[in-house]
């Protein structure tokens, strides 16, 4: 639910981690599902994996940056 007062939006935000997807620093092993997706999506697709720290809250939302 978004709160809006006088045209201003208020939100609570916490950044836990950040990283670069492309180009990759190291090439991690990809899963079988990622392999199938890469074949389906073509040359412009890049596999990536999220690793959330133990301190991450139990309820999160991923948003494009």
Image (cartoon, rainbow, N blue to C red):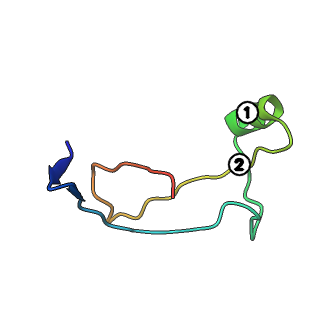
Tell me the number on the disc at residue 14: none
* Dot 2 alpha-carbon crowd within 10 angstroms: few under 14, some 14 to 19, many 20 or more: some
Q: Position of residue 55 (x, y in %)?
A: 31, 66
Mark 1 secondary-structure assignment: helix
User: Is 7 placed above or below 34 here?
Assistant: below
Pointer 1 residue: 37
Front-most of residues 4 and 11: 4
Q: Is tag 2's residue or tag 1's residue first in the polypeptide sequence?
A: 1
Q: Is residue 22 left or right of residue 5?
A: right
What residue lies at 70% left-to-right and 39% top-to-bottom?
Answer: 34
Q: Is residue 1 left or right of residue 52?
A: left
User: Is 65 placed above or below 43 here?
Assistant: below
Q: Position of residue 40 (x, y in %)?
A: 79, 28
Tell me the number on the disc at residue 47: 2
Q: Is residue 62 left or right of residue 41?
A: left
Mark 2 secondary-structure assignment: loop
Cβ–Cβ below 8 Å for labels 2 and 1? yes
């Amino acid at each position: 639910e978004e709160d809006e007062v006088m045209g201003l939006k208020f939100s609570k935000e916490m950044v836990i981690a950040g990283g670069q997807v492309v180009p990759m620093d190291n090439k991690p092993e990809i899963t079988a599902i990622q392999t199938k997706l890469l074949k389906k999506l073509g040359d412009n697709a890049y596999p990536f994996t999220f690793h959330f720290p133990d301190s991450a809250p139990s309820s999160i939302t991923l948003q494009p940056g």
